[in-house]
Image (cartoon, rainbow, N blue to C red):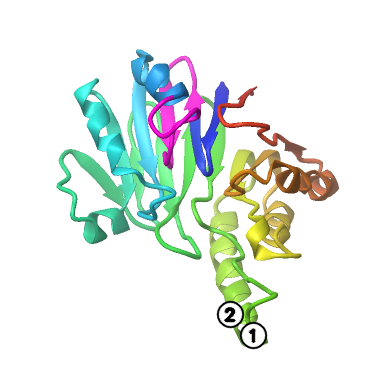
């Protein structure tokens, strides 16, 4: 299995049987040029394109034009994209929290978020993979009141516990580690790893703050979790 960091929260997963592109925002080199347009769209294996929610940094409507290059794309989007977008959709599967998509290659379960949309648990190729979307402990401790912080954390822990109830472990997790949160920007990731044993953790949603994202390694060591911190857009790890 090959996993490619595209940009921001965008990733591609490649196996001998399928390709998955998640939360495409921009390609790995520039807005419309990189690993996706140059290679992945031409890969012959079955292609799935997932979007966790409609925020512009997770959902780019340009992905719908990919059908002009190949007709066999399976689109799986969060329900909020259908209800909020003015775009006309055709042959797209929309799922909400606690709903599932399943075919002969993949099982994709939708879990909650602490922002818009959903998160994805993907089972395929004998792996269990999680993409958090915007699920995180978005506490903003240095800007929020104590009550706001308390409510944000309780909300996050409810969603995390719901995921953990049916997810005893993960092979791979892609999860926000966003330095804009301030001094506790890794708290949500710490709580996630404490709750769900994870073999490989990959930070996302950090823009170009690669050094800040790399600090998650010190937390992951406590849980014996390996970490892959992308060093650039288009970085690849073989799993």
Picture disc at residue 123: none
Front in this rendered view, residue 215 or 209: 209
| Residue 206: x %, y % from top left | 62, 49
The residue shown at (57%, 31%) is 233
Front in this rendered view, residue 167 or 146: 146
Report the span colored magenta.
13-33
For disc 1, the neighbor class at 10 Å (few under 14, some 14 to 19, many from 20) is: few
Quarter of the image where the N terminus is located: top right
For disc 2, the neighbor class at 10 Å (few under 14, some 14 to 19, many from 20) is: few
Q: Is 146 rendered above or below residue 100? A: below
Magenta stretch containing residue 62, yes or no?
no
Between the C-alphas of marks 1 and 2, the distance is: 10 Å
| Residue 147: x %, y % from top left | 62, 86
The answer to whether residue 51 shows anywhere in this view is: yes
Residue at which label 1 appears = 145
| Residue 2: x %, y % from top left | 56, 22
Front in this rendered view, residue 107 or 156: 156
């Amino acid at each position: 299995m090959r996993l490619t960091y595209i940009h921001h929260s965008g990733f591609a997963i490649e196996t001998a049987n399928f390709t998955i592109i998640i939360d495409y925002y921009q390609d790995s080199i520039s807005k419309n040029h990189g690993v996706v347009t140059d290679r992945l769209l031409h890969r012959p294996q079955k292609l799935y394109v997932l979007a966790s929610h409609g925020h512009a940094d997770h959902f780019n409507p340009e992905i719908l034009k990919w059908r002009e290059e190949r007709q066999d794309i399976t689109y799986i989007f969060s329900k909020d994209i259908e209800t909020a977008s003015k775009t006309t959709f055709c042959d797209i599967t929309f799922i909400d929290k606690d709903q599932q998509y399943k075919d002969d290659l993949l099982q994709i379960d939708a879990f909650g978020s602490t922002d818009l949309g959903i998160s994805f648990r993907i089972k395929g190729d004998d792996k269990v993979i999680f993409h958090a979307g915007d699920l995180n402990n978005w506490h903003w401790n240095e800007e929020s009141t104590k009550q706001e912080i308390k409510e944000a954390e309780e909300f996050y822990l409810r969603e995390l516990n719901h995921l953990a109830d049916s997810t005893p472990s993960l092979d791979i997790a892609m999860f926000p580690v966003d330095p804009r949160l301030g001094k506790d920007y890794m708290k949500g990731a710490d709580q996630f790893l404490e709750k769900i044993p994870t073999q490989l953790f990959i930070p996302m949603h950090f823009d170009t703050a690669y050094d800040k994202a790399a600090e998650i390694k010190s937390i992951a060591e406590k849980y014996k979790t390996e970490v892959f911190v992308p060093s650039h857009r288009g970085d690849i790890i073989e799993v």
